[in-house]
Structures are given as C-alpha cells and as structure tokens.
C-alpha cells in the first residue's frame, strides 16, 4: 500500500534525496567509500559543503555580506547562540507558540527581552498583528511557522529593526526578503534533509557587537572563519540537504515551491472547511500555515476522533496525529509532499464523512 | 581496486553498518519510509534510540546510576557542556594535545582550571605520567586518545578524583572502568557511526551540584529527563551508531575489539620500527595509540615523503596524510579497520623500501 507521510519532522523528503543518499551510503562521489566514512576535510566532502552553501545563497537570493553555515544542535541550540552573538542590550520577541517561547526564555539569560505580543490567550491559534517594536532593540525575533499550532507568517514583516527568525519549518517554502533579517536559522529535518544539520544564514556585519565572551563553539564568527568546518559537521545530513537543494533548483526554485505549497494547502483547507466533521484550529485564514495544517473534529463529531485516526491509518496515512497541546490532527505538507498525497487525504476525509457523517 | 580507508574521522565503518543504513535510507523498519523522514517520536525510532542506549550500557559495562545520551554538536560542544554541568569551583585538566587544550580553554570560562601536566614541550608526543591531582577539584579531565599526535592512555588512570574523559577516538576500543568517570563523551564519527551524534555517558549523582544557571540545551539533566529526545536528535547518525553497536556485540564485544586493535597496531608499529625509511612519532611504546598510528620518514629518507604518499595512494590507501602539526603519515585503525588493510599498508611500506631504500 502507498504510504502518505504527514510527519511534522523529521518528515517527507524528495525521492531524489533518498535515492542519492542511499547510493552515497555505499559509494560516495566515486571514492569507493561511504559518505559516512569519508573525512569532512576530503576534497569530495568539501565540495558538498561548498555547493550546499552556494545553493542556499542562490535559492534564497541571499544578499552579499551574509554567511551560510551548516551547524549542529537544531533550532534549540540557536535559541541560545542567536542572543549570545546578537543580543547586546535588549531584544524583542514575538511569542507565537511553544518554540517561540523557548527562544524567548533562553534570550533572557543574556539580556533584556521585550515580548512585543503573544497569542497565548487563544492557545496560539493566531499571529498577533498590531504590535509595536521598540526601535532601541538589537533585533526582533520571530518564529515564522508554528509547527505545533499550525500558524504561519506568510510574508516578511515590515518592522523598524532587523529580524532574527526561526524558520525551521518553512525555510525554502517561499521566496523571502533575506535583507530584512540579521539571521535566519532552521533545523534541517523539515524542508531540507535528515536531522542533524542546522542551517544558519547570518549577516556578517551584525556580528562582533556584543560585549560578552562567547564560548568558542557558540561563536558564529568562529564557524564563518572556518567555513562551517570548525568541528566535524553532520556530514550525512549536509549531504542530504545538498540533494534536496539540487532538487528544489531543478523543480523551479522557491517560486515554484510556493506555488505548489499554496495549491496543496488550498486543497486541504477547502476540504476541512467544507466537511461537516472537521474544522481548522486556526480561525483566521490569513494565519493558516501551508506547512502544518492542524484540524480537529467538529464538536458534534468529537467522538469519532479515534475512529478517523484508525480509518486514515488504514488508508496509508502516517503521522497525522496532532500535537498533544492542540489535539486532533496535523497534516504536514512540506516542499516534498506531493499533491497526490494531499488529495488522498481529502478523499479519506470525504469517505469518512460518507460513512459516519 | 580495493580501497583501504585510513581516515582519522569520519572514518571506516563496518560493512554491516553501511548495508543496514543504505537499506534504511530506502525503507526503515518496514515502515515503507526512509529513516531520514520518520519522526523521532515514532515507535520505530524510539526503539532505535532505546536499543542504542541499552547496548552502550551493556558493551561498556556501565554501572547503575549512569545515563546514556546521544546529543549533537560533537566533542567541541562537550568541551563547554561538561564544565557547565560539572565544574563548580575548580577542575584539573591534563593537556595532551590540541583537543585537550581546547577542552581546557572552554573550562576556564566557567571556573578555576589547574593544568596538572602537559606534553606540549615535545609537541605532545608522549602522555605525562608523574603528576599530582589536587583532591579539591571537581574532576580531572583527560583526553584518552590524541588523534593528531598518535598517543593514547591505554589504561584507566588511578587518581583520587572522578574523571571526565573525551574518548572521541578510542571509545569502545577496549573494556574500561566506567566507574572511574563522572562523564565520558565521544563524537560518533570514529568508532561509532556517522558524524552528527555525540555519545555522552554521565553519572546522575554528579549533576545538580553547580551554582550557575545552565542554558536549557546545555543541561544534561534536561536531556536525561527527556530520554535524549529533548530536541530532535541526529536520527540517521543514531541509527548508524546502533548498527555499529550491534556489530560490536556480534563480533564479541570490547574484549574482542581490544584483541583486534592490539594485533593491528602491533603489526603496523613492528613494520615502522623495522623499516629503515620510517619512524614513529611517539618514542615511548607505552604511549603509542592503537587508533591513530603516526609516522614520518626517517631523516635520511625525508625527501621521499611525497613519493611515498603517491605510491601508497596508487595502492588504494586513502586518508594517510598526517595532521599538519605533526606532518608525515597517520594510519587510523579504528574498530572497523580489518587486519587485511593493515597488512596491505605494511606490504606497501616494504615495497617502497625495496624500491627506494
């Protein structure tokens, strides 16, 4: 039976990424060795790192003066590294969910933090709109997609200070204006590749302005000076990221990714809005994530939740269970998710409605 | 042509690890999905993490009261995390090389550090023996194998304080007495699996004794409480580590690994000592690493270095180039290195001597 992979992360990757990685696990770049057992300083792996960095710059249209790194430790380490390197006196944080809150908490260890707005009052089911950002902060931190709650900032904000953004779950899903950000970071395991690598795009001029001693491994400048090879990177993860970056380019880049992501999200949200058994957890359509579509049973059909879960699983749907803090279901539709899998889910929802509705 | 992989890291892995990982990149645990695209919270991946932790405990004979973690960031992040969690007032460090020095440097950010001994006076070509360890330190930090300089502490030290050890390049290469250590850490990319995962074995009772606020991602207790899943681990790396751990167990465990490692090292050092064109960089035979065998041309044949490099490369030898701070050659003989590859290198050295000696 065909499986449809709706996991929130690690999550679906292109067939191209899987095939190329499986091949390289056996024989990498004609070396006769596995990509797992080749030095990161070998010319073959250095070429992987350099091409991955160059493709990020090309696909994301990264302006001059920025560096691209593939670090380790996930977004959770960046919650600490970003303020260590960029927060001198005061930073602003927009609190749009659990992960945004974790980022905010770590920043408080390093300076004054202003929470400019929060949607906690409604279990983070919307993106706060009307808030003011103090002009004396070093940056505004935003979480552009909230994986748990299914909300997303679909456009780059206009604010009077540079932004720092956790884009773990929507990086490379649409064209964006990198010049508005002093730093962008993203765990690889949604739109990029195997977990283990963490993409960091950082503006060089934004560094070197804090007055604290930065531990070596937490210092972006150290990583930049060592071309993302200060210590051994997660080589297989970076190799996988490169394959996905090549795939994105071959498929038409971020304009095409956005077109597909809009189409997939529209198909699924339309069914959620139409089907009398389901409802979105995000009332404002402008805030609905294209990456993580969260939905629950309508109150009159609440007793069917487990039954739908079993029904969908029997149709080959994997990873649909919603996060415990929201409940219900979550269909993650990252770049690699084909429209056909979304249509299969919609068909399953229609069939369930016909059976039980 | 058969390739012989002498890279210092990432480095040779068992064929078993390569085959099982290549299979799982396409279909993991019968899920129909790649191990790269399955949630770390799925029952299939949780089983991987749990078995890997249990096998580390079994193979290393870890006493009760210790936790096993697979973190990210490599030994370089542990240089910071170890003192953050374990250094309350003062720690002792044994300086046996570049990596030991890096560990020492980070610890100084967090407290008083006593360098109990150093072999820097002789470019780290020996392990200091007669030094005293203050009894009022929180721990003595040792680097059990010095990858760059080819020295190794082949037995667990007897010291009056608990040890913290960077075992990145000799973990699982011999049975050891874990009870002497408050913590052991090791990057995966030598004896364990693909880079990206970092093995940490830590004594639970040693934690919670420092007076500082520990950033969340740097706090061992957080990782222990979350069963090494506080944030997304490097899943493919952990999967690879599990395959290697299974292989070690099937091959006879650490007693058998040590027997093989002694045999391989003896074969190579015997040839280095016999062959008039080569010499070891480590004069004291008791300090010679079984993992990284460093050797240079003897002074009278110094002009043949590049020629031997080309000659060995033509015989299928890969990764023999020594680190720039030592020069010459380095043959890394980790667990997965077969005796046949060592014999092939010895044959190459003999042939070169016959040609040019």
Image: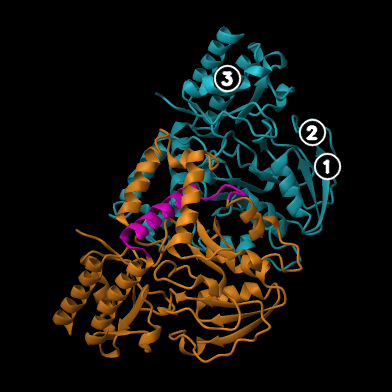
Chain colours: A cyan, B orange
Specify whether residue A263 is in view.
Answer: no
What residue did someone put label 1 on? A116
Along the line of sight, which residue is nearer the eye, B27 or B249? B249
Quadrant into which the C terminus of chain B falls: bottom left
Give me the C-alpha separation between circle 1 and circle 3: 39 Å
Location of residue A229 in the rendering, given as x and y in whole percent from the top left corner: 50, 61
**Bounds of the magenta segment:** B229-253
Which residue occupies the foreground of this view, A242 or B180? B180
Tell whether position A55 is magenta. no
Query: Is residue B234 inside the magenta stretch?
Result: yes
Q: Report the front residue among A183 and A15.
A: A15
Q: CA distance from mark 1 to mark 2?
A: 9 Å
Residue B162 sits above or below residue B337 on the image: below
| For the residues bearing labels 2 and 3, Cβ distance under 8 angstroms | no
In the rendered structure, the answer to whether residue B282 lies left or right of residue A184 reads: left
Give the mark, 2 or 3, whose residue is nearer the N terminus.
2
């Amino acid at each position: 039976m065909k499986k449809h992979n709706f996991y929130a992360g690690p999550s679906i990757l292109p067939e191209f990424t899987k095939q190329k990685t499986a091949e390289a696990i056996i024989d990498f770049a004609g070396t006769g060795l596995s990509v797992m057992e080749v030095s990161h300083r070998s010319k073959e792996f250095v070429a992987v790192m350099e091409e991955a960095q160059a493709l990020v710059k090309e696909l994301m249209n990264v302006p001059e003066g920025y560096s691209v790194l593939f670090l380790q430790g996930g977004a959770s380490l960046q919650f600490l590294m970003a303020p260590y390197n960029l927060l001198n006196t005061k930073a602003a944080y927009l609190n749009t969910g659990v992960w945004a809150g974790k980022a905010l908490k770590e920043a408080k260890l390093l300076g004054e933090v202003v929470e400019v707005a929060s949607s906690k009052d409604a279990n983070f089911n919307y993106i706060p709109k009307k808030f003011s950002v103090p002009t004396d902060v070093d940056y505004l931190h935003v979480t552009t997609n909230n994986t748990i709650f299914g909300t997303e900032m679909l456009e780059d904000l206009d604010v009077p200070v540079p932004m720092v953004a956790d884009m773990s779950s929507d990086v490379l899903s649409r064209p964006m204006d990198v010049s508005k950000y002093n730093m962008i970071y993203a765990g690889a395991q949604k739109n990029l590749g195997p977990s283990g690598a963490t993409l960091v795009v950082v503006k060089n001029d934004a560094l070197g302005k804090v007055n604290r001693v930065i531990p070596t491994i937490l210092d972006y400048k150290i990583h930049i000076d060592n071309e993302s090879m200060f210590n051994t990177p997660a080589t297989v993860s970076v190799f996988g990221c490169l394959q996905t970056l090549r795939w994105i380019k071959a498929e038409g880049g971020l304009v095409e990714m956005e077109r597909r992501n809009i189409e997939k999200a529209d198909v699924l949200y339309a069914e959620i809005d139409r089907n009398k058994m389901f409802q979105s957890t995000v009332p404002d359509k402008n805030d609905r994530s294209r990456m993580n579509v969260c939905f629950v049973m309508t109150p009159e059909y609440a007793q069917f939740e487990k039954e739908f879960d079993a029904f969908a699983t029997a149709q080959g749907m994997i990873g649909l269970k919603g996060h415990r803090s929201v409940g219900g279901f979550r269909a993650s539709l990252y770049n690699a998710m084909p429209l056909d899998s979304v249509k299969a889910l919609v068909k399953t929802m229609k069939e369930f409605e016909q059976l039980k509705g």
